[in-house]
Amino acid sequence: MIKIKKLLSPCITLIIILFSFSSCEEKDEKEPPTVLAPEQIVEVDQAKEMYDRYTDRRVPLIQHYEDSIDRALYDSKILQHKKAKSKTIDSNTDKKFDVARYVSYDYKTIKQYLAYIEQEAKKANVEISSLRFYFSNYPDKSFFDNKDSVLHPRQNSLLLSPTLKKGDREYLFYIGGTKTEEQAILLTDNFGEINNQEIGATDRMGDKAHASILPNLTNTTTNPALNTSFYSGTSLTMNKGTGAPPPWNEN
């Protein structure tokens, strides 16, 4: 009997140890690490206050401006019809301009975008330092010059674009160069070309490549959305979100 107990004791100890490890693994799988809220999170009442201030201080200005354009176009049409002695004219002057209040993206699209810009930056051997959200406005036409459709003519929108840090400042950038050696091409804060500056031109120090100021126009990987004289490469700027005015049936 004593011998049996001596034999069972190590077995029981081993089972307890294995069970403890198994419990720890299950606990780790069930309890992911807690993610702390960013310092930039604001309370709901603060968000409401800021939204309402935009309603009071910006929406009327935008609406008044856009409505004045509509009235001017309508008056011009009346004058043209009078000259043509026509008695019929379509009137939309009673319809007020709907001012966009938000832009939305599918959550999966945001995750895909973040993964994409990180991938492209890695190819060019640079690091993204920040992500900018630019206020923008759609033109009053149906298509851009590159034949891309204008989603919401005259409506406000957002442009999302990454930056990289060079020296003591940040730059917008897109990806240029060749298929075998891609480069980050720097842009000004207003998406403009940076002309004839030699800083950062394709030189490499350590493991990271410095961003190039001017694109390499030979054998570039082109994006049809970039059709101007110096934008020859891959854009990292996102738009085409869903913009909408506020739901008028809510208080």
Image (tube, rainbow, N blue to C red):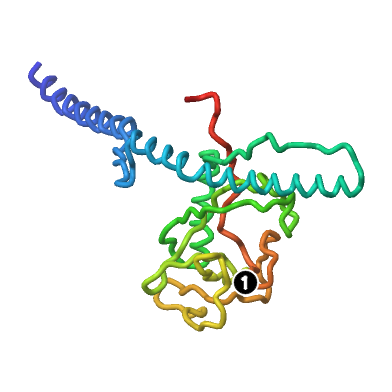
Total of numbered circles in the picture? 1
Residue lying at the far left of the rendered structure: 2
Q: Position of residue 70 (x, y in %)?
A: 69, 45
Q: Residue 206 sits in which quadrant?
A: bottom left
- In this view, 222 is above or below 74: below
Q: Residue 91 sits in which quadrant?
A: top right
Q: Amino acid at mark 1?
A: Thr
Q: Position of residue 5 (x, y in %)?
A: 11, 20
- In this view, 152 is above or below 16: below
Q: Is residue 144 left or right of residue 37?
A: right
Q: Is residue 45 visible?
A: yes
Residue pictured at 67% horizontal, 35% vertical: 95
Q: Position of residue 154 (x, y in %)?
A: 64, 48
Task: Tell me the SS state at disc 1.
Answer: loop
- In this view, 92 is above or below 83: above
Q: Residue 51 sits in which quadrant?
A: top left
In the foreground, 127 or 82: 82
Q: Is residue 108 visible?
A: no
Q: Position of residue 232 (x, y in %)?
A: 65, 69
Q: Residues within 10 Å of mark 1 (few under 14, many from 20)?
A: some
Residue lying at the far right of the rendered structure: 85
- The residue wearing badge 1 is 178
Residue lying at the far top of the rendered structure: 1
Residue pictured at 68% horizontal, 34% vertical: 94
The quadrant in which the N terminus is found is top left
